[in-house]
Amino acid sequence: MTETSGAKKEVEEDSYLVTYTKHLERKIRALETEKQLIDAERIRLEREVHAIRTELERMRQTPLIAATVVDVLEDGRVIVKSSTGPYFVVQAYSGLGASKIMPGARVALNQRTFSLVEVLPPTRDPFVRAMEVEEAPQVTYEDIGGLKEQIREIRETVELPLLKPELFKKVGIDPPKGVLLYGPPGTGKTMVARAVAHETKTTFIRVISSELVQKFIGEGARLVRDIFNMAREKAPSIVFIDEIDAVGSKRMDLATSGDREVQRTLMQLLSELDGFDARGDVRIIAATNRPDILDPALLRPGRFDRMIEFPLPDEEAIMDIFRIHTRKMNLDESVSFAELVKKTNGATGADIKAICTEAGMFAIRELRDRVTMDDFLQAVEKIMGKEEGNSFNPQLYG
């Protein structure tokens, strides 16, 4: 009995030891996992502490003084005008490179020694940055109807110099510096400019001339400078100036202070147009509904060399425009383009687009999925009825 009980006791002790050993092993694994988590958290906190210390050191740095370079002397010293007003002759940090330091550049000066330590990027008005169209406009030449001759001319004067400048070099001529598009509203001037930007894959900068008319003296001229500087930086680029008559109208001898500010803006625009290389990577397109009131200085050779007229569409052009704007529409068999062309004589491309949209709305109003001829006739009556009171004078564009 004693031996049996002793053996039994040994078995129980062995079983206990095995169970306890497994328990300890599980505890060790759990502690190792916990240690790994703590190590990962420690590394994360160390990185955070390092980032905070770096930011703290950066914030403790002595502030720099903004200045503008006035001139660079032969011995390497630089004349600058600080933001506080006075002029200084300072030494430039040798690591900057002489090519970066030029008159007009923005620089930073050490607050204690006034030495030039950094070249700052040029300022640009947020208003000007907003004029840049980041993505190429989604308008192609196939989306434009009835303007084959106008598209050919603008491709020759804008697209070819950007895509194949070597052709002009071989022939030995300079392409036109600027192109002026003129004609009644809604005839496709803006649309063609957007299509050119799409085809050339260039930066498209759209400027509304009325936005250049500012309240304070010199602000409009400064905006013009910033726009053309951005065009040079973003080259190849197209600057499209819409409604240019807002700043480009004829100058009068008797003018108010507001008129004189518009004239200052015009003078800056003329100066920028003169400063462009005809073979450069920046092309200028302008559009207007009133070419008769533009200042002659704006139209002289060397600025806007080519003028392209955008007339009201003829019957063939109206047919093309109807087909373009209805190619995605679900039309009924009763729709006759020939009849619509007769009823829309004198309509612009914008009018025809509005007619197609309005016809679709008449169908939607009655919960139909097909557009009928009656819908188009109602749309013509609605849209063209608004145009009856227009006092358009074709002689302005002759």
Image (tube, rainbow, N blue to C red):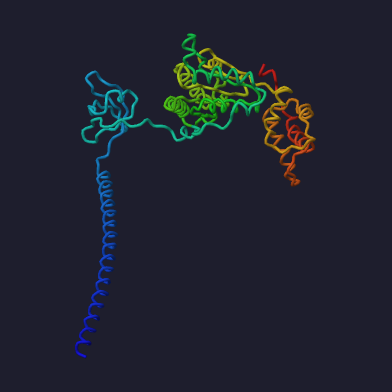
Of residues 244 and 186, the one nearer the viewer is: 186
- The image position of residue 46, as x and y in percent, is 25, 53
Residue at the image position 45 percent from the left and 35 percent from the top = 126
Residue at the image position 72 percent from the left and 22 percent from the top = 314
Q: Is residue 73 above or below residue 230?
A: above
Residue at the image position 70 percent from the left and 21 percent from the top = 393
* Image quadrant assignment for residue 362: top right
* Quadrant housing the N terminus: bottom left
Name of the residue lying farthest toward the top: 172
Q: Is residue 66 above or below residue 77?
A: below
- The image position of residue 275, as x and y in percent, is 44, 18
Of residues 217 and 78, the one nearer the viewer is: 78
Asked whether, in this view, residue 363 is left or right of residue 176, the answer is right
- The image position of residue 162, as x and y in percent, is 49, 20
Of residues 110 and 313, the one nearer the viewer is: 313
Name of the residue lying farthest toward the bottom: 1
Of residues 192 and 114, the one nearer the viewer is: 192
